Amino acid sequence: MHLIAGARPNDLVWRAHSGRRRGECAPKDEGVAMDEGTPGAGRTPISGDEPGYGIGAVARRLGVPAPTLRTWNLRYGIGPSRRSPGGHRRYDAGDLRCLEEMNRLIHAGVAPADAARQALKVRRPGGGSPEADCDEQVPGPPAREGEILSPAMLARAAIALDARTVGDAVEAALDRHGVVPTWERLVLPTFEVITRRQDETGLGIEIEHMFSDRLLYALNSVAGRLSQPIHPRPVLVACAEEEQHSLPAHALAAALAERRVETRVLGARTPYSALAEAMRRIGPAVVFVWSQQAETGDPAPLGRLPRLRPASRILVGGPGWREGLPPAVARVTSMPAAISAVMSALR
């Protein structure tokens, strides 16, 4: 497979990130561990004759892991509304009904944030009491075409080989947020879930291939929308000879298209002789070459690329490149850095 087979998320990310961005969804439906004995602010104490449920009992009843329940509480405000006399958080019957409805909506394909908003509107209509009954809620809609999914939900759709949902979700994220945020905050965390599952089970290449195919289609759709480029000379994007991992190259082309930069993508395993011929034929302003694996990152052939007039700026990216780049070749270590270098060369 010429896309990402065998890739790890940190390879696709150009360089390893030190951590997740603030406010970014975690790849799994797991939240920050929280002490069950910590009293929640604004929680109503349970009276002596009113039953309350601990998080463990609720998790067993719903079939939802306790970390997920904590995430719902921390992220969406869907949590226990009561406290025991000892200060422990407790779910009452109304809380359970709301959680059951939220769980039902998520299983029906609704994004967690949307499911929570619907539940909260019924739970506290107009700022009412938390005891409002969620049974009055109008049933939520099925998953909408083009809905923005979390990395965890997108990974579940990929694992189910639901190509339509995967494609619609990626396209919606690209339309709403753009290529770079979608790549870093949705695509890479989703790949992390998929590859971790492969590591744990030894299975799932078909999942990776389907997800890669839908992602490639969405990225190429963005790149294909370009009209009236800002510069008469295009940017030539290719993978190093024998380098089969091409998704980052296509992602860069799509990101440049958003900035009205015309690209020509030669794709995976581009022989340096073919790259040189393409340079002579179209006279690109910039040439970008991606290497993901050390076996494909030999810098020597870069020094033999043709010297054109006007000159072409040569950029390389990816973790595969070895030391010893020719003096005229610049290395970029992130997609934003690559975009910045290209835009500077076009000025």
Image (spheres, helix red, strand yellow):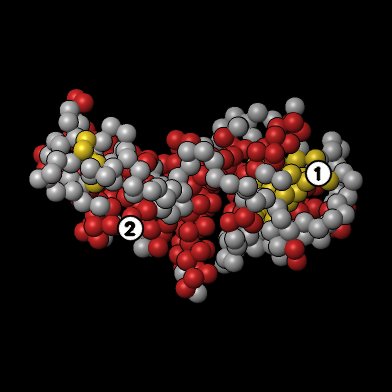
Specify the quadrant that holds the C terminus.
Answer: top right
Specify the quadrant that holds the N terminus.
Answer: bottom right
Mark nearest the camera among 2 and 1 is 2
Q: Residue at x 64, y 56 (%)?
A: 11
Q: Residue at x 46, y 52 (%)?
A: 27
Q: Residue at x 81, y 58 (%)?
A: 322
The disc at residue 330 is 1
Image coordinates of residue 64 in percent, x first then y, are: 29, 57
Image coordinates of residue 120 in percent, x first then y, are: 24, 36
297 vs 88: above or below: below
Query: Looking at the image, which residue sits at the far bottom?
Result: 202
The kind of secondary structure element at disc 1 is strand
Q: Is residue 224 among what the camera can see?
A: no
How many numbered tags mark residues here? 2
* Among the two numbered marks 2 and 1 on one chain, the one whose residue lies closer to the N terminus: 2
Q: For the residues marked 2 and 1, what is the alpha-carbon distance in whole angstroms?
A: 48 Å
297 vs 53: above or below: below
Instruction: Count residues near mark 1 (Cα–Cα under 10 Å), then give few for <14, some for 14-19, many for 20+.
Output: some
Q: Residue 143 or 130: which is nearer the viewer? A: 130
- Residue type highlighted by circle 1: Ala
Query: Looking at the image, which residue sits at the far front?
Result: 86
Instruction: Count residues near mark 2 (Cα–Cα under 10 Å), then give few for <14, some for 14-19, many for 20+.
Output: some
Query: Looking at the image, which residue sits at the far top?
Result: 126
Say which residue label 2 marks: 65
Residue 244 located left or right of residue 189: right
